[in-house]
Every structure is written in C-alpha cells, then in structure tokens.
Amino acid sequence: MRVRFVSADGDSVREVEATTGDRLLEVAQADGQPLEGTCEGQMACSTCHVIVDPADFDKLPAASADEDDLLDLAAHVTRTSRLSCQIWLQEDWGSLTVRVPAEARDMQGR
Ligand code: FES
C-alpha cells in the first residue's frame, strides 16, 4: 500500500510503498522522515507524533487512552493527531496520508 508523507509546510510530499502490518513509525524512519521516535514505540515520548489526513483518519482504529494521554503532551496536536508508533498499516486502507509536524524537524531546518 501507499503511504504519503507531507512536510510540515505542505510543500513536499513523499510517496512510499509499504507493506501491510508495517508500523508507520518505521516506514517513516526508513524514508528519512524526521520523526525521532525516542522511546522506540514504548509510548513514553511523543516524538513520533503525526497528523493524519482527515480523509484517512476514520480508517484507523481508535487511539488507546494511553495514546490519547501522550498526545495531550505533544505540541501542535490536532483532532487527527496520532502516534505513528501505534499505527500498523492495514490492507483495506488502500493508502494513508500523514503530515509530519513542524516540531519534528531536524536541526538543519529541512
Ligand atoms: Fe515514543 Fe511513539 S515512539 S510514543
């Protein structure tokens, strides 16, 4: 399936091919997206925060209470924010588009 990563400013879109069952955080990191994922999916940070395209948001299973709690701590959270370490790609989604929040940019200001 196809995953699209939209940059924080919306100017660049990367489209990558991913496999059902892949975790979104790892797909993003493999593509060089600036998501730190500091806790490696242990739900102890929020540096894997992404903003899901509203058109895709309802495809995803609901966030757990723990995920919601962590999202409360992330900067620039929106109604469609999720932790990418908690999203495993599912075949029937067809595609998924997410935006990488500005805070996740690296020090080079890419
Ligand atoms: Fe830390 Fe997702 S990688 S919460």
Image (cartoon, rainbow, N blue to C red):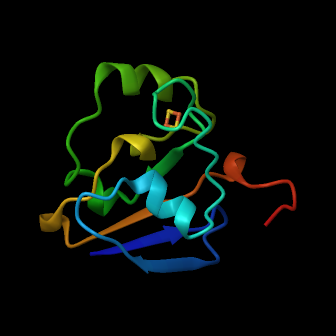
Residue 27 position within the rendered picture, expressed as x and y whole percent measured from the top left: 45, 63
Instruction: Using the image, determine if residue 43 lies above or below residue 96.
Output: above
Residue 83 appearing in the image? no
At 43% from the left and 78% from the top, the residue drawn is 16
Query: Where does the image place residue 38, in percent across and percent down from the top left?
Result: 62, 37
Residue at the left extreme, as displayed = 92
| Residue plotted at (42% across, 43% down) | 85
Q: Where residue 89 appears, x then y in whole percent?
A: 27, 58
Q: Is 49 placed above or below 45 here?
A: below
Report the number of discs. Answer: 0
Does residue 54 lie above or below 11 as drawn?
above
At horizontal 20% and vertical 42% (from top left) the residue drawn is: 61
Left or right of residue 102: residue 77: left
Looking at the image, residue 71 sits to the left or right of residue 64; the answer is: right
Residue 105 locus on image (x, y percent): 73, 55
Is residue 47 in view from this perspective? yes
Location of the C terminus (image quadrant): bottom right
Q: Which quarter of the figure has residue 31?
A: bottom right
Q: In this view, does 51 lie to the left or right of 88?
A: right
Residue drawn at the location 78% of the way across and 55% of the way down: 106
Residue 39 quadrant: top right
Q: In what quadrant of the picture does the N terminus appear?
A: bottom left
Which is nearer the eye, 9 or 21?
21
